[in-house]
Image (tube, helix red, strand yellow):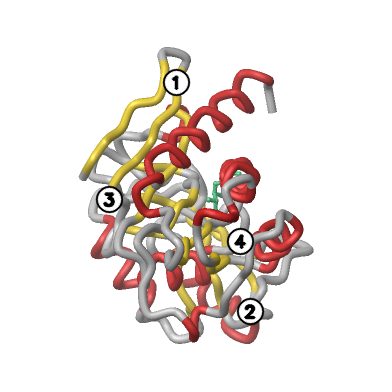
């Protein structure tokens, strides 16, 4: 990663900390995503650990980083709602629909986001696209279904392969699908999620971002959807 890219991620993470300031209250539980941008957000959040009650993590990796930084991590079962969920994305379009799962945490990310009132997406401007699909779409799949799911992806016109050497926190595999040009993300998200063996796919369109904080060399832009 270039220094510039790292600086942009840092700027987006800082903007997220500033954005969630009103929700950092003694009873608040914050939803936290996974990835290199989310890691920078976590480090800033840990510095404010005395301002809120706890966090819910979208991966084992994030849970460890939060705990190492002194933040209490709760199980989602113990939390009825969260004011905000903050996470990165691999792509985001002008409607706030995203592809996520480059880090393989898409299922837990989608679950934690679904229990949060607002999805705050933190990205650098290189993640903004007109049409989703340049980044390969990750699908979490129960291992015995992997060949069947690859055939279905290829029938859609994509090229699909199992991510090598990777097992999700849920014990499953990731099928990455390249070559898709996704013009109706909500329809495709629902369709793929109905295939037997799919746990979930990395389209976040049925529940998309509420706000994106997009970092570029000119500064951070807030986009509301
Ligand atoms: C992990 C994700 C990440 O949010 C996505 O891959 C972006 O990561 P990064 O901030 O490292 O570019 O969905 O499953």
> Does any atom of ligand 1 lie closer than 8 Å to the CB of label 2?
no
Residue beneath label 3, please? Answer: 210
Q: Is residue 181 left or right of residue 35?
A: left
Residue beneath label 2, please? Answer: 170
For residue 87, above or below residue 147: above
**Hey, which residue is sitting farthest top in the picture?**
218
Q: Is residue 157 left or right of residue 5?
A: left
Q: Nearer the viewer, residue 144 or 34?
A: 34
Give whichever of discs 3 and 2 has the lower sequence position. 2
Is residue 150 at all visible to an observer of this figure? no
What is the quadrant of residue 69 in the picture?
A: bottom right
> Does any atom of ligand 1 lie closer than 8 Å to the CB of label 1?
no
Q: Position of residue 201 (x, y in %)?
A: 45, 67
What is the quadrant of residue 71 in the picture?
A: bottom right
How far apart, in angstroms, are the residues tagged by discs 3 and 1? 19 Å
Label 4 packing within 10 angstroms: few (<14), some (14-19), many (20+): many
How far apart, in angstroms, are the residues tagged by discs 4 and 2? 10 Å
Q: Are marks 3 and 1 in contact (CB under 8 Å)?
A: no
How far apart, in angstroms, are the residues tagged by discs 4 and 1? 25 Å
Residue beneath label 4, please? Answer: 104
* Residue 216 numbered mark, or none: 1
Rendered residue at 25%/49% (across/down): 183
């Amino acid at each position: 990663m270039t220094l510039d890219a790292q600086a942009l991620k840092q700027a987006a993470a800082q903007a997220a900390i500033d954005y969630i300031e009103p929700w950092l209250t003694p009873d608040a539980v914050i939803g936290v995503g996974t990835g290199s941008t989310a890691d920078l957000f976590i480090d800033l959040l840990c510095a404010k650990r005395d301002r809120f009650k706890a966090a819910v993590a979208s991966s084992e990796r994030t849970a460890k980083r939060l705990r190492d930084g002194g933040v209490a991590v709760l199980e989602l079962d113990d939390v009825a709602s969260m004011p905000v969920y903050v996470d990165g994305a691999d792509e985001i379009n002008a409607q706030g629909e995203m592809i996520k799962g480059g880090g393989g945490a898409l299922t837990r990310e989608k679950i934690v986001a679904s229990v949060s009132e607002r999805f705050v997406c933190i990205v650098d401007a290189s993640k903004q696209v007109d049409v989703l699909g340049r980044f390969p779409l990750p699908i979490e799949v129960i291992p015995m279904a992997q060949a069947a799911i690859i055939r279905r992806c290829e029938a859609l016109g994509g090229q699909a392969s199992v991510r090598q050497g990777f097992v999700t926190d849920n014990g499953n595999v990731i099928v990455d699908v390249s070559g898709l040009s996704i013009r109706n993300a909500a329809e495709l998200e629902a369709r793929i999620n109905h295939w037997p063996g799919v746990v979930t796919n990395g389209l976040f369109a049925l529940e998309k971002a509420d706000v994106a904080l997009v970092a570029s060399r000119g500064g951070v832009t807030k986009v509301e959807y």
